[in-house]
């Protein structure tokens, strides 16, 4: 085992540990959500609560204690540069809208970047007691069981996840859905892009497309999809690209061509 492998393994173990801790903290807030003060961001559909902030702080503190030279990008508190070459990218509660409305479609997403790619991806789904976990060259698992994608599922015999937000026009989302349906597919939207990417890695969805997402929403899921044998559209992580949004597409082997055509990438 070389030094990079040892470094990745150490961070992978910590990412799993912190995801479980963060999930427990978030679940406590979820069960007492009537007491949460909910704030809106730039759009009425984009909400945040003290739960998001405190969960992110828990993860950030854990990373700082163990790997103080690592960078850290969180949805709530932004980017702190590091010097180690590793950067943690975290969404403390992806799917805050489902979270505050009492739906289980939310998760904690943790990724670690190194060498311009997500080398670790861990997604904890507290309401379903599911831990998705993967690391570069080590495969992906769901609660310890290996995830392996094949080419049997296509957009015509499986379901595709579609995401939308205020950064894209309703017309463009409508064209995507219309094209998917005309091609013989069907779709779902759960309110958490990170969760739907985990579902791609697990084979529950054949693919996921969203015209505009942030790094903290997708990089953990991207690692899982790759390690399970799927494909994803690279996310621009260099320079300011890491803090800006970009199109996100991840698919199982049997849907790559169809979904790349539908997404126009």
Image (cartoon, helix red, strand yellow):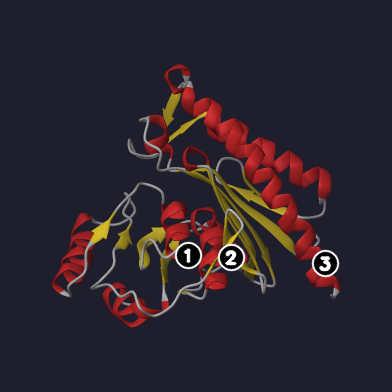
Task: Determine the image quadrant of residue 174.
Answer: bottom left
Query: Where does the image place residue 109, in percent across and percent down from the top left?
Result: 56, 50
Label 1 element class: helix
Which disc number belongs to residue 65?
none
Identify which residue, 198 or 37, lies in the foreground.
198
Query: Where does the image place residue 133, in percent across and percent down from the top left?
Result: 60, 58
Query: Where does the image place residue 123, in percent across and percent down from the top left?
Result: 56, 52
Q: Quadrant of the C terminus?
A: bottom left
Query: Where does the image place residue 181, in percent across and percent down from the top left?
Result: 16, 68
Label 3 element class: helix
Q: Considering only order in the chain, which callout, 1 or 3, is on the residue closer to the N terminus?
A: 3
Q: Which residue is mark 2?
A: 140
Tell me how far mark 1 sits from mark 2, CA to CA. Answer: 8 Å
Q: In the image, is residue 56 above or below residue 162?
A: above
Marks 1 & 2, CB-CB < 8 Å contact: yes
Q: In the image, is residue 170 above or below residue 99?
A: below
Q: Residue at x 80, y 71 (%)?
A: 4
**Residue 84 shows in the view:** yes
Tell me how far mark 3 sits from mark 1, CA to CA. Answer: 24 Å
Which disc number belongs to residue 6?
3
Tell me how far mark 3 sits from mark 2, CA to CA. Answer: 18 Å
Marks 3 & 2, CB-CB < 8 Å contact: no
Tell me: 140 left or right of 62. Answer: left
Label 2 element class: strand
Marks 3 & 1, CB-CB < 8 Å contact: no
Identify which residue, 103 or 244, lies in the foreground.
103
Q: Quadrant of the N terminus?
A: bottom right
Tell me: 49 left or right of 210. Answer: right
Q: Which residue is mark 1?
A: 201
């Amino acid at each position: 085992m070389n030094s990079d492998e040892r470094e990745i393994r150490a961070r992978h173990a910590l990412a799993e540990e912190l995801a479980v801790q963060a999930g427990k903290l978030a679940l406590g807030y979820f069960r007492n959500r009537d007491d949460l003060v909910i704030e809106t961001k730039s759009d009425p559909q984009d909400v945040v609560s003290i739960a998001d902030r405190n969960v992110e702080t828990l993860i950030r503190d854990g990373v700082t204690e163990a790997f103080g030279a690592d960078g850290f990008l969180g949805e709530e508190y932004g980017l702190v540069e590091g010097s180690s070459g590793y950067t943690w990218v975290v969404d403390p509660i992806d799917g805050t809208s489902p979270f505050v409305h009492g739906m289980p479609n939310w998760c904690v997403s943790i990724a670690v970047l190194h060498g311009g790619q997500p080398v670790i991806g861990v997604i904890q789904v507290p309401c379903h007691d599911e831990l998705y976990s993967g690391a570069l060259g080590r495969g992906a698992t769901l609660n310890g069981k290996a995830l392996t994608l094949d080419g049997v599922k296509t957009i015509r015999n499986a379901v595709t996840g579609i995401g939308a937000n205020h950064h894209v026009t309703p017309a463009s989302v409508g064209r995507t859905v219309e094209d998917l349906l005309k091609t013989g597919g069907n779709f779902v939207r759960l309110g958490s892009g990170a969760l739907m990417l985990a579902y791609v890695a697990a084979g529950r969805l054949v693919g996921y497309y969203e015209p505009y997402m942030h790094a903290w929403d997708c990089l953990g899921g991207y690692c899982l999809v790759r390690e399970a044998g799927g494909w994803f559209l690279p996310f621009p992580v260099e320079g300011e690209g890491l803090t800006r949004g970009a199109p996100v597409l991840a698919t199982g082997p049997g849907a790559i061509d169809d979904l790349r055509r539908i997404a126009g990438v």
